[in-house]
Image (tube, rainbow, N blue to C red):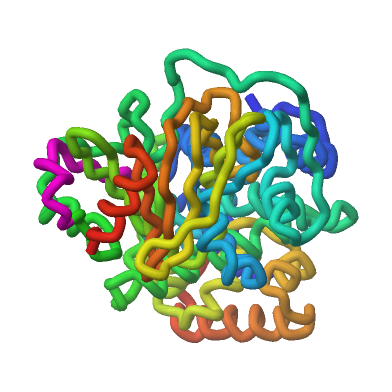
């Protein structure tokens, strides 16, 4: 060991670096946070993912999927599937979860009461709004900062429009549909999408790659579509009205 | 404290892969300080964010981690990468501003000695901070985190000969700049 090496080891003990005891807690919190768009790229899934993101629908109630990313990919025909079906109704009752863009209790990551211009500075995509006059007057704008490219919620009297930056990353918001309810392919101005009829569960992958279904809420019928790298979701309208409003979003 | 946990890295990794977050927390606690030191040496004030990102990323990548491999160099590869990314994307392209801690005065030690030691450490750190990135990285991994030479090579994903010669070059650069100043 040379003098300079000794000096460097000694120096290491005296570095005034940032970071305290709370780092462990912060890391664990981040691991547990919902991550609607995981940062780890899986190039082979990128092309179809845009559509799938949104809607991973599994006929029949389903619980306990692990590892979830593989399960979702499998369901779409990639990788090996590991899905356990159980004949059990979807949970009901008040939501306790904080799925980004949901109508549930507000998370600290969500900023409410914003103006469009303020929200626009916080997301990487251009926020689109419905131009159809029957949409009504917008009653609220929220930004959820947990997604890398941003997520915006626009509230209208009869419906909610959610816009999520797709960014080509692995999508992790899914929907579980109970028996008797169904999903139809749909297009909005030529862009691919789905219409999910009836109530269904919303799920998401947490940062560790697990599907979280324990605290999911029930969602009403939604129209989901993807255009220009942004995923849109309208909730609260019948199919015909949703399609008309969706077509006016730009 | 987690540092008292007797389980090996491999046991903890295996637990974490099965979803045991407490096991992963033990690993975070075990490598928190050395990870911060490496990140600080590479990315300066962005160290904490880099280390947070690195641990979160490591957790997500655990599935792909080869269980027969050593966890420590694998983790520090991620720490070094995240730190490098932070450094590169940082708007401050100037020399890193690194600091030594002001130490509490220990009983019996002459104040003059303490001041001299502190000044010497500051001088050494200034010189380390002025090294080109690739040399500062190897110094941070080998000396700030205390990795062995072979672990340092593994963390840099380069042959051990390359790591060794880079290290030796870094030390020579430090010596050249410090002259005879280091008397520790």
Looking at the rendering, which quadrant does residue B144 occupy? bottom right
**As drawn, which residue projects farthest toward the right?**
B68
> Residue at point 57% right, 62% down?
A49
Magenta span covers which residues? A131-145
Nearer to me, A121 or A191:
A191
Nearer to me, B133 or B71:
B71
Answer yes or no: is residue A6 visible.
no
Q: Quadrant of the N terminus of chain A?
A: bottom right
Q: Is residue A211 left or right of residue A15?
A: right
Residue A165 screen position, x and y as percent? 38, 59
Nearer to me, A81 or B102:
A81
- Callout count: 0
Residue A249 screen position, x and y as percent? 24, 59
The answer to if A202 sits in the magenta stretch is no
**As drawn, which residue projects farthest toward the front?**
A240
Q: Quadrant of the C terminus of chain A?
A: bottom left
Q: Is residue A229 left or right of residue B159?
A: left
The answer to if A140 sits in the magenta stretch is yes
Q: Is residue A83 above or below residue B183?
A: above
Q: Is residue A221 left or right of residue A112?
A: right
Q: Is residue B41 left or right of residue A63?
A: left
């Amino acid at each position: 060991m040379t003098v300079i090496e000794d000096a460097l080891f000694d120096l290491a003990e005296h570095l005034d670096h940032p970071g305290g005891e709370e780092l462990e807690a912060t890391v664990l919190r981040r691991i547990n946070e919902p991550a609607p768009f995981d940062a780890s790229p899986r190039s082979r899934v990128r092309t179809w993912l845009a559509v799938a993101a949104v809607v991973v629908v599994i006929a029949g109630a389903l619980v306990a999927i692990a590892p979830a990313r593989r399960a979702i990919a499998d369901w779409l025909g990639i990788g090996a599937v590991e899905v356990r079906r159980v004949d059990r109704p979807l949970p009901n009752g008040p939501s306790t979860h904080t799925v980004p863009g949901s109508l549930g209790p507000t998370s600290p990551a969500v900023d409410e009461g914003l103006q469009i211009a303020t929200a626009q500075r916080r997301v990487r995509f251009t926020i689109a709004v419905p131009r159809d006059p029957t949409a009504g007057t917008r009653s609220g704008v929220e930004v959820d900062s947990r997604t890398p490219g941003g997520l915006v919620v626009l509230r209208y009297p009869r419906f909610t429009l959610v816009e999520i930056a797709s960014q080509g990353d692995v999508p992790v918001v899914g929907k579980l549909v109970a028996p008797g309810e169904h999903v139809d392919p749909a297009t909005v101005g030529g862009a691919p999408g789905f219409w999910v009829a009836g109530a269904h569960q919303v799920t998401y992958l947490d940062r560790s790659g697990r599907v979280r279904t324990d605290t999911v809420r029930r969602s009403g019928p939604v129209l989901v579509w993807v255009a220009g790298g942004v995923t849109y979701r309208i909730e609260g309208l019948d199919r015909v009205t949703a399609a008309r409003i969706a077509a006016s979003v730009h | 404290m987690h540092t008292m946990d007797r389980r090996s890295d491999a046991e903890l990794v295996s637990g974490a892969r099965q979803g045991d977050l407490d096991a992963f927390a033990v690993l975070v606690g075990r490598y928190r300080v050395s990870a911060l030191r490496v990140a600080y040496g590479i990315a300066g004030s962005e160290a904490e964010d880099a280390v947070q990102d690195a641990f979160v990323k490591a957790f997500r990548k655990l599935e792909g981690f080869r269980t027969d491999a050593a966890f420590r160099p694998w983790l520090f590869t991620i720490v070094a990468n995240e730190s490098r990314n932070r450094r590169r994307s940082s708007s401050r392209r100037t020399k890193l501003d690194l600091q030594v801690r002001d130490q509490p005065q220990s009983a019996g030690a002459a104040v003059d000695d303490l001041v001299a030691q502190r000044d010497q450490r500051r001088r050494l750190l200034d010189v380390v901070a002025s090294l080109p990135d690739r040399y500062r990285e190897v110094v941070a991994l080998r000396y700030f985190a205390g990795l062995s030479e072979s672990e340092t090579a593994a963390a840099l994903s380069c042959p051990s000969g390359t790591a060794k010669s880079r290290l030796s070059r870094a030390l020579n650069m430090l010596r050249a700049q410090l002259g005879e100043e280091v008397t520790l």
